[in-house]
Each structure stands twice: as C-alpha cells, then as structure tokens.
Amino acid sequence: MPTRRGLLACLLPVPALPLLARPALAQAAWPSARPIEIIVPYPPAGGIDIMARLAAKHLPNHLPGARFVVTNRVGAGGQTGNEAIFAARPDGHTLGAIASLSLSSIPLERPVRWKMEEFTYVAQLVEDPGALWVRADSPLRGLGDLKAAAAKAREAVSVGSAAGIGSDDHQLLLAFEEAAQVRALHAPYNGTAPVIRDLLGGQLDVASYNLSEGISLLQEGRTRCLGAAAPERWSAMPEVPTFREQGFDVVGGSARGFVAPPGLPEEIAAPLAAAFRATLADPAFVEEAAKLNLPMRPLVGAEYRAAALREAEGVKDLFRRRPWGNG
C-alpha cells in the first residue's frame, strides 16, 4: 500500500507542529524513503496474499511516491500476523491484509492481543462466498441431496473444511447443519490444497472452501459446486445456485481487506482511503482482479468498519449456539 509514511514521519515526530500546517503536508507526495509494509497473516499464494500483492502493484498509481512491500507473518491461524498489525505504530508505515472474520472468531477461542473495534479499517476489496463442493462423479447433485444423505445417520457424510476449526469454511458447515437440521462428520484441514486432494481422492464426500478457490477445478469438470453461500449468483459461475435458492437461508464467506493499527491519524488515513477508492475504480485493477477470479465488494473506511462489526455479531451468535469445540 502506497507509502504515506513520509507524511507520518513529518507529522508524528513533531507533535508541536501547528494544526494549520497539517493539511498542506497531507497534500504532498507520499515520502518514498521508507516503504509501507503490508503484513499478510497467512502463507504466500493464498487468497489474501494474492489480494495484497495485487493492491500493492496498483496503489502507487494513486498514491504518488508510495512504495509497498508485502510480508507474510504466518502462525496460529492468522493470530500472529493480526497481533503484529495491531501492535505496529500508527504512522502509515504498516497496513494489514486480513480476513475480517478472523478478527472476531479467534478471540472466541483463545486470548489475543487485539480489540477488533480498535483497528483502523481502511478498505475492503474482496468478499469471497463460501461453498460446498463434491467430485464430478458424486451422487450428490444439490444441497437437498446433501441434507437427505446426512439425515440417514449422524455423521454419515464427511465434510472437510479447508481452513480448519472456527474458519469461515467450518462456520459455513455449522450454519448449513443448523438450517438443514443434520450433522456431518467434520474433518478440519490446514489449507485448500490438502482438502481438495482428499476430495478428489475419495477420502471426503464434501469439501468446504471459497468460490474463487474452486473455479479452476469446476471449469475443468473435476468438481461440482452444490451451492454458493452468497446473496446472489456469482457472474463467474452463473450455473451455481445459492443456498437460499435451494431453501437454506445461509450466507457467509471470507471478507478480505486492509486495516491499520489503532489510532491512525486522519491526515494519514484520508489519503490512504482516497488511494484505495481510486484503485478500486481503476479499470486496469478491475480487469486484473477479474482475471485472478477475485469476487470484489469494495467498502472504504467507516462502511468497511460497520460491515466487519456486523459480521462479528453473526459470528458471536453462531458460536453461542454451536461452539467450535463441539464441532
């Protein structure tokens, strides 16, 4: 994300600087001496990492002088990176590329060193709906078939979640179980690649992972999507019905965007938000995002914060009814 750090460097070290001088500084080119670090709490080549690197490529076009470097800080299912983002100085030199659901779900399971409501919410880029997938030769043709198969006996159907316990993939399964009044045999995984491997190999009946992660195998005819947990069908997969179309009121997935540490000054936050807004409207960015199969849902600033906090309430409600440990 473009380096507004120079601005911050000018502002923060000189607390006595008159307020009237700050607007002038905010209009200057972003200082290029020090890059803006984008912390990604997940491994390279995943959905959040791809989003972060795409944004880092295009943001400098709308934040002159800014440079970006992407750093993967992996550990504890995203907790390590999330804590590093929260603890960084609010000077514009650090941004985090995050899945907002992790900010609310991880604290339900264990102690963390952040408060979700205190992050500075810069911009959401992607909202990648969850989905349930089967092999192309599976007898399951839709969610109704899945419900019927699971109703035959408790845990008669195995479902693997790509990101494991408490993830959006797991929460999708829990929400479907509630809506269908069935229970499946949950198999948590530590990544999309291994869950797809076992789905294709026949070790799993069903797999839960996001739409963008499944489009390639779907197009190759190796898998089928039983349903998308989206408000409406995705244009890249118009043949895939939503959960609601099949009688299950379930919507969920992975909302991904950029946050900054708490207390980011407005004179730094405003130009960052403007740069994201311009990038999200840039035809070159939009075209490349489409090629990467990123389902876009742009939200900037307060709009993004409100959406993340609404999502958090839904996560808490589900956890009260179906604590992850009960699975």
Image (tube, rainbow, N blue to C red):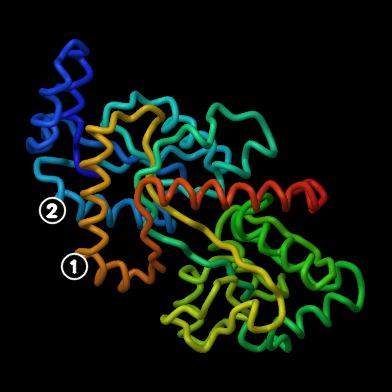
Under circle 1, the secondary element is: helix
Quarter of the view holding residue 131: bottom right
Which disc number belongs to residue 91?
Answer: none
Q: At 62% from the left edge and 52% from the top edge, which residue is drawn?
A: 167
Q: Note whether 205 is above or below 222 in the view shown.
A: above
Estimate the x, y position of residue 46 in percent, counting from the top left: 44, 56
Q: Quadrant of the N terminus?
A: top left
Q: Is residue 142 left or right of residue 56?
A: right
Evaluate if marks 2 and 1 touch, with contact meaning CB atoms under 8 Å apart.
Answer: yes
Which residue is depicted at the point 43% across and 25% down?
87
Q: Disc count in the image? A: 2
**Residue at horizontal 52 percent and vertical 89 percent from the top:** 239
Q: What residue type is labelled 1?
A: Ala
Q: In this view, does 154 lie above or below 98?
A: below
Q: Which of 45 and 242 is in front in this view?
A: 242
Residue at 55% across, 73% down: 231
Q: How crowded is mark 1: few (under 14 residues within 10 Å), some or many (20 or more)?
A: few
Q: Answer with mark 2 or mark 1, whichever residue precedes in sequence.
A: 2
**Number of the label disc, if any, that sits on residue 61:** 2
